[in-house]
Image (cartoon, rainbow, N blue to C red):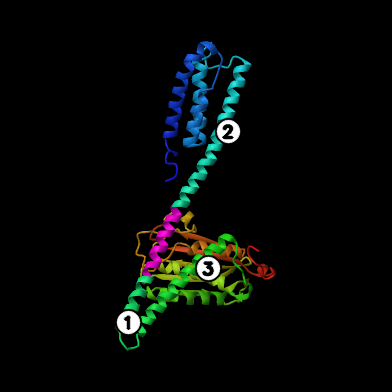
Amino acid sequence: MLAPFRTRGIWPYVYGVAGVIIATFLRQPLHTWLGDHLSFSFDYLAVFLAAWTGGLWPAVTTAILSALVSNHYFTQDQSLQITSLEEALDLSFFVVVSFVIGLLSETSLRALTRAKQAEQDKDAFMAAVAHEMRSPLSVIYYASTMSRLSGSERPTDQLDVIDRQVRHLNVMIEDLLDVSRVTRGKIKLNRRQVDAAAIVAGAVERARPLIERHKHQLKVQVSPEPMALFVDPLRIEQVLSNLLTNAAKYTPDGGKIVVRVREDGGQAVFSVRDNGIGIAPESLPRVFDLFMQAESGRDRRDGGLGIGLALARKIAEMHSGTVQAESGGENQGSEFVVTLPLEQAARVPAQLAGV
């Protein structure tokens, strides 16, 4: 783990207090030479220690404590009052420098926190990739072995199994490549005018095998009025199919999934609602983060790398749209809402993202 001694807990304040005590003892032998002069030479070490281990607020707290202790023990009247311009300047300089030290360390500590989170996400991602790829590869190996043992008979069942697993691997690899392209801004949008109902139909066909496997009830409600969009239809189908797949995976068998499309204020509004496991309130703000998966301990027979929702949001944003998640909490189901511009989008020329 990166720099385990740097923390947000109580220890930086403890280090600061200890540093002030040590600085006071180090200042004592020089008191005769310095006289009543207010000096913070040793206190900078205490501030630096508190700042380096805990960031801004431990540094500020240590600086205040140092000023009080020094003013009380090393000034003539020992009354915690500033009695001369020199003392005021010394104190002001000490406070400003301590604040700058704390601010710089806070920036460093936040960067370290992000690095730790990135390291954890990387480890989780690598574990997910290894798990998800191991399953279809094991099935392919088993089917291949069985086909060799079948003799001269046509091993159609084994070939079907291999075909399905190869398609599953291909989808997984395409998702990984799409994440890379989105991150680097290299996805090409092939925009054209298309009706919202056609996009929904295409997305439903993509997700239908998983929905039928879990015996879900799927209800599609599309406005009878045509809603023309100027989008990349394959990419928007990908957005909706990711939402449908997510709903199918996290809804118990025999659940209900409802897809609605309506027009609202010059926008096409797509919603996918389910009566599944829902989303805990603390997880809702991170549901679109890369590699975020609900309930890591769930049965993972349907696979997934935790990139579908993140990819859906990025693609929607590239079309000047949005994706939002709502849930009443655990076991309360969830709803994902996609909004895309209607008429105003038709006047936007096709463009290459990131070029």
Contact between marks 2 and 1 (CB within 8 A): the answer is no
- Residue drawn 42% across and 65% down? 304
Judge the density around disc 3: few (<14), some (14-19), many (≥20) Cα neighbours within 10 Å: many
The mark nearer the N terminus, 3 or 2, is: 2
Q: Identify the residue position indicated by label 1 in the image.
A: 148
Task: Judge from the rendering whether residue 315 lies leftward or rightward of residue 147; answer left or right.
Answer: right
- Residue drawn 35% across and 74% down? 141
Q: Is the magenta stretch mostly helix, strand or loop?
A: helix
Judge the density around disc 1: few (<14), some (14-19), many (≥20) Cα neighbours within 10 Å: few
| Image: magenta residue range | 120-135
The mark nearer the N terminus, 3 or 1, is: 1
- Is residue 130 rendered magenta in the image? yes
* Local secondary structure at mark 3: helix
Q: Nearer the viewer, residue 45 or 237?
A: 45
| Three-letter code for the amino acid on which mark 2 is drawn | Val
- Marks 3 and 2, how far apart at CA: 46 Å
Q: Residue 100 carries which label?
A: 2
Question: In the image, residue 278 lies at what x, y percent?
Answer: 41, 61
Q: Identify the residue position indicated by label 3 in the image.
A: 239
